[in-house]
Amino acid sequence: MLRSVKSQIILALSAIIIAVMGATAYLLIDQKTREINQDIFQKAISFAELTHERIISSFESNYQEGATVNFERELAQIYSLNRDIEGLSIYNYSGEALYQSEALESAFKPNLERIQAVFPSVRTADENRIVYLEQIDSRLRYTDFNGQEVNEVQDTEQVQNIVYPFRDPNDITRGFSLVYEVSYNSLDQLIQQMIMRISAIAVVGIIISLLVAFLLANGITAPIKTLSRGAEKIGKGDLKTRIPIKSKSEVGLLAKTFNEMAVELEKTTEVRIENEKNAKEFELAVEIQQDLLPTDLPEIQGLDIAASLMAASQVGGDCYDFIPLKDQKKLLFYIADVTGHGVGAGLVSAINNALIPALIEHYGNIQDLVIELNRLLKLKTGSSIFVTMVMAMWDEVTNTIQFTQAGHNPVVHYHAASQKANTLSPGGVALGMVGDISEVIKSEQVKMEKGDVFILYTDGIPEAWKNDKENYGMERFLASIEKNVQLESAQAIHNGLIKDVKMYMGDHPQADDITLLVVKRTA
């Protein structure tokens, strides 16, 4: 079975050329056969017309007088004028055979109608029909015995014999009919010669066609093989492989497309490698950020705590932490939101988380701590990155929470006695915007009674979107707080609040980080 394109092209082209040559040979032989058939017929009729009187004259003067040799010699001379006449018979008007060539003693079966007819007649070999030839002026009329016109002798028909009458108008008893037997041996020989010549030409043509088909197939398949080798190299990782374009045909267009594909593939691969590199960096940043977030919440007497962070991307810009100060019976905790999200925001939040534990040893007052933190962030971060924050300090002795706000969302204090959630916002400015915020930063303090809840959150909650036009909002958030604070634990309250936000968002994508801290006074 032929599998290669080259072999298939050679076979197809060779078959087409052979078919064309065969059809051409058939048409040439058929056309030549028709021409020779018609030529033999016309020449036989003309030969009979020119020789019948001479033959009868020699028959009467030689054959009937016993000079047979002279008559046969005369006939031989006449036969030499037309090689397609292979024999002769002479009949009288009554249909009696007066002379018959030795080779044709049984060839002609006497037909009295033809022998006694006034006009010459022919018998065709294929259809075995008898056609009479009536000469009218210069036109030859083809008829049957009754004078009705019939189809003329076609160039596809071969004449078996010709009966040509001889009538003496002065002597009615002097009437003869000559039967000329027609041979097509010359046609057969000529056809055989044509077949031999055409066969020789066909052999040469087939050899040439195979050569042409090979060259043409090679011209088509060579670029394809080059493309195949190029694809193999690319498959092995050599993305700089290019195919030389030497043709403007479809193959050349394919090579051009291949090169364009290779260029795009190289670019895509570079982008993929870069993305994989970035992904690893993302993973590392996520790991660093997660490590900086508290893994276990502190157990503080009189408090129940719950917290979570849901980043909108792989690396979030939110952060929080709980730092117990056991020797002072205090708990420092905070929540911060870096503008934007992604690696940049994640790095700043990581810096923020790393700085606070270091600064707390030097600044016991959270307001002073926030002022110093702002100074460092302004010094170390870009002008386009800011951090909003709420930093709070729980005092176990006084049962109070002191908090400082730096441009962040208002905190929510649920007062159990009044069963009312209030927002508290001392103001302030986001960290990193200006070098010194000591004049604008303020602190507030709230008394935490049993059952009171203190809630810190980032703007990912009130700005959670249900669709492109509606967001969650503070009013709904406060209503959810008043509903869920009745739950027993801080974790249950936390879960109820997050669930309500998620139900509101539905399938809409999360646009910003969502961080929530719930601190409940239990005793």
Image: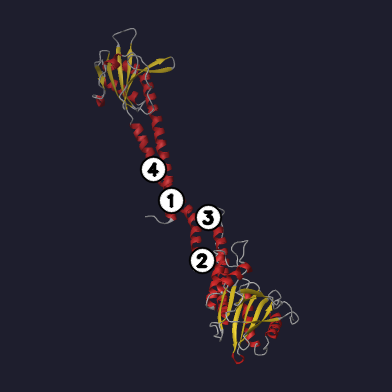
- Write down the residue under mark 1: 210
Numbered tag placed on residue 199 in the rendering: 4
Circle 4 or circle 3, nearest the eye: 3
Q: How many angstroms separate mark 1 from mark 4 (CA)?
A: 16 Å
Seen from the viewer's position, the closer of residues 465 and 11 is 465
Which numbered disc, 2 or 4, marks the residue closer to the eye? 2
- Real-space CA distance between mark 2 and mark 3, rounded to the nearest whole angstrom: 19 Å
Residue 251: which disc?
3
Q: Mark 2–mark 1 contact, CB under 8 Å?
A: no
The reply to whether residue 514 is visible in this rendering is: yes
Residue at 66 percent across and 78 percent down: it is 389
Would you identify the image quadrant in which residue 105 lies? top left
Coordinates of residue 514 in the picture (x, y in percent):
59, 72
Q: Which mark is residue 114?
A: none
Q: Amino acid at mark 2?
A: Ile
Residue 498 pos. (x, y %): 55, 71
Q: Earlier in the sequence, mark 2 or mark 1?
A: 1
Residue type, numbered disc 4:
Ser
Estimate the x, y position of residue 211 in percent, counting from the top left. 45, 52
Residue closer to the observer: 194 or 250? 250
Question: Tags 4 and 3 in contact by the CB under 8 Å rule?
Answer: no
Residue 276 seen: no
Q: Residues within 10 Å of mark 2 (few under 14, many from 20)?
A: some
Q: Which residue is mark 2?
A: 234
Going from N to C along the chain, the mark reached first, 2 or 4, is: 4
Report the side of 3 relative to 327 (left or right). Answer: left
> How far is the residue under mark 2 from the one under mark 4?
51 Å
Q: Looking at the picture, which amino acid does disc 1 mark?
A: Leu
Is 220 placed above or below 317 here? above
